[in-house]
Amino acid sequence: MGNTILKPKLTIDEQIEHMKKKGITFSCGVSEDDAKEFLRNNNYYMKLSSYRKNFYKRSEGKKKGQYSNLDFAYLKELSTLDMHLRYLIIEMCLDIEHSIKVVLLNHVSSDPNEDGYSIVNNFLSFNPNNMKILSRIQTHKSGEYCKDLIKKYYPNFPVWVFLELISFGDLIFFCDYYAQTTGIRIVENKYMNVVRDLRNAAAHSNCILNNITTRIDPSKQIDSTIVAFIPDNRGISKASKRNNLNYKFAYNFTTLLYVYDSIVGKSLKSTRYSELTEFLKTRVCRNRSYFLKNDKLTGTYHFIDKLVDILSSRV
């Protein structure tokens, strides 16, 4: 383990005391006893405390190193908003996955030279990880919803069955292969990798709103297509656009919206954008007073809110 410093295990009482030493208060409607109850039944310390990264620390004075204007209620609220956002992200990613399959199968069906089997066989022959892909499919053979398909077709799948059985990541690989062999690109890998990461984070209940103030690696260029996706003179200034896209959360969520807007059909988009609008304008604003003094959080909120307004107006 080298020079790794091992952090001691803390009881819930010790967790509360540790937060107090960090400058976290308990004065906005959530008492210390309420916080203990919340940590016992609703969330756990490591996850909840990760949202601290969105708040500023004092850089001087007796309270140097402590958080400024951070109450336990703010952390609790962010964890709740994160939960709601994860559900929306999962729904959006399922919409994207479904839409990719529909578009892909339409192209395959329209190709007179393709029987639906050869493209899968060629993909598996071409892919050095073909055995891993087949192995991942085999792990579902005892599952109630896939076993009949696997039993009937394994290992010679028609594309319409294959797409039902492969993982989201393998679907991205398959789309890339299809683009290389036919010249028809359904989705861009570089954007789908961001979507996949968000999908996995949401599906595994990882924190998403804990890095709102984290900048992207300065060595990475902001993708010009993502920049162009946000129209000028529609309530988002060029300065706001550039500034927000330099932060991981805003950039990744904008990329998700770009892919969603590009491939998902009008009816689904209308439904999902309405849900996003409801979330942003109602649930997110319920305790907005908690975050009014945090310029980065409020700035990110206004950026995402305006972008969703723009997208909703197009549907």
Image: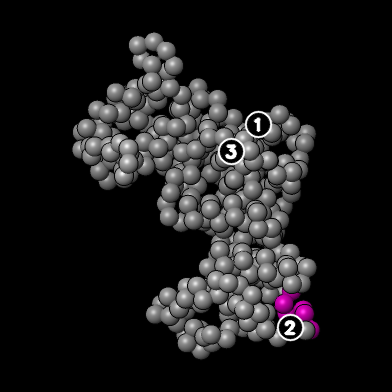
Q: Looking at the image, is mark 3 or mark 1 earlier in the sequence?
A: 3
Magenta span of residues: 107-112
Check disc 2 and report its element: helix, strand or loop. Answer: loop
Q: Residue at x 63, y 69 (%)?
A: 174
Residue wearing tag 1: 243
Q: Position of residue 31 (x, y in %)?
A: 27, 29
Q: Position of residue 2 (x, y in %)?
A: 32, 41
Residue wearing tag 2: 114
- Front one among 216 and 298: 216
- Front one among 192 and 30: 192
Q: Residue at x 46, y 24 (%)?
A: 56
Check disc 1 and report its element: helix, strand or loop. Answer: helix
Q: Residue at x 79, y 84 (%)?
A: 112
Q: CA distance from mark 2 to mark 3?
A: 42 Å
| Residue at the limit of the structure toward the bottom, as seen here | 152
The three-letter code of the residue at mark 2 reads Glu
The three-letter code of the residue at mark 3 reads Ile
> Are discs 2 and 1 less than 8 Å apart at CB?
no
17 w.r.t. 12: above or below: above
Query: Which of the two discs, 3 and 1, sits closer to the camera?
Result: 3
Q: CA distance from mark 3 to mark 1?
A: 11 Å
Q: Residues within 10 Å of mark 1 (few under 14, many from 20)?
A: some
> Are discs 3 and 1 less than 8 Å apart at CB?
no
Q: Is residue 83 found left or right of 114 in the rendered image?
A: left
Q: Residue at x 71, y 64 (%)?
A: 186
Q: Is residue 180 visible?
A: yes
Q: Position of residue 258 (x, y in %)?
A: 68, 50
Residue wearing tag 3: 216
